[in-house]
Amino acid sequence: MWGNLIVLHDDAEERETREFDGFVSWHTCMRSVYIADDRLVNKADVPEDISYYSGFKAYQLILEIVTGVHSRLFGESEILSQFRDRFRKENLADSPFSKNLHKLRDQILEQTKIVRSRFLTGQGRQTYGSIADSFLKSGEPISLFGSGKLAEAILPYLIQKHRSVTVVARNPSRLSELKNRFSIDTCLWEDYTDQSESLVIASSFFPETFTINSKSKRLIIDFRAEAELKEIPANSRYVPFKEILANITKTENHLTKLRPEILTFIEELTLEREEEQIHLLHGWEDLACLEK
């Protein structure tokens, strides 16, 4: 089924959020992935500055990404939720090969579950939300800056243990959506005022004026891998992303040792999938009647 699968992969730090004709895109904080059938796109239009995978190598790459093998926090599970959400049926309605993308999603999720249950069960904290929870006290007020996928993944962990959480963001419709789903307060960036609460930064955009003049004793947890606060208030405990990763070094080291074994197992699963589909000579099924 996946002999005609194409995947473009861009994980450059300064990458642009681009779109390509005929490709279904999936953007996360770390990477952009574009998926297509090679008979429905003009491969000459693919830029040279982006990694290109085809066939079952493309399938294997998606499986590696969704299992968390290529994440900064090795083995983290938020990427699995992001993949599932992006490839929900309603999000693929306009795709010319949506039926096959549903099958791709289901097969990737099926094999991701196999990989995670075999190698990653009970391996310690593997979500950014659970790490944030480990730093925070029960019952304390928190302001979460950001409303994207990372912020959404962290939220369930923040609101537990009787914590009061305010989400601060620039998009009012996104704030409304989160407020309908979670027991939180919301605030637009321009309306934010310092309440001496703990801060969790889950947005690449963060005005340092929010903290630079603060005299409050507070905890600031910063999930930005690409930036850190330049000036830290004297009374604040600042936890940059590199310290977050350092706090899980022991688990990370153990998982890193597992990495070659996991990659080998994923390759075996991919080969099994390829053997299952070897009788489908024309690649993606159900595409024969489609035209560009």
Image: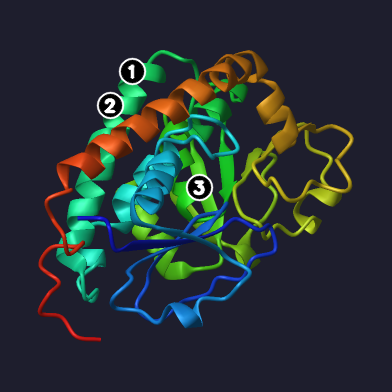
Q: How many neighbours does mark 3 have within 10 angstroms: few (below 14), some (14-19), or many (20 or more)?
A: many
Q: Is residue 139 visible?
A: no
Name the residue that disc number 2 marks: 114
CB of mark 3 within 8 Å of CB of mark 2? no
Which image quadrant is residue 12 in?
A: bottom right
Q: Nearer the viewer, residue 25 or 180?
A: 25
Q: Residue at x 52, y 25 (%)?
A: 259
Residue kind at label 1, given as amino acid type: Arg
Q: Is residue 5 above or below residue 22?
A: above
Q: Secondary structure at mark 2?
A: helix
Instruction: Name the residue beneath numbered marker 1.
Output: 118
Mark 2: give few (<14), some (14-19) or many (20+) Cα within 10 Å: some
Q: CA distance from mark 3 to mark 1?
A: 26 Å
Q: Tell me the quadrant of the picture where the C terminus can be found.
A: bottom left
> What residue is pinned by disc 3?
150
Type of the residue with mark 2: Ile
Left or right: 196 as drawn, with respect to 291 = right
Q: At numbered mark 3, what does the secondary structure look like: helix, strand or loop?
A: helix
- The residue at 62%/63% (across/down) is 189
Residue 168 rendering spot, x and y as whole percentages: 56, 56
User: Are discs 3 and 1 less than 8 Å apart at CB?
Assistant: no
Q: How far apart in space, not on screen, are marks 3 and 2 (Cα)? A: 24 Å
Q: Nearer the viewer, mark 3 or mark 1?
A: 1
Task: Tell me the residue at 20%/67% (across/down).
Answer: 98
Q: Nearer the viewer, mark 3 or mark 2?
A: 2
Q: Quadrant of residue 246?
A: top right
* In the image: residue 220, left or right of residue 42: right
Residue 140 spot, x, y in % from top left: 56, 29
Q: Position of residue 223 (x, y in %)?
A: 64, 42
Q: Which quarter of the image is occupied by the N terminus? A: bottom left
Q: Please indicate, yes or no, whether residue 55 appears anywhere in the rendered image.
A: yes
Kind of residue indicated by mark 3: Leu
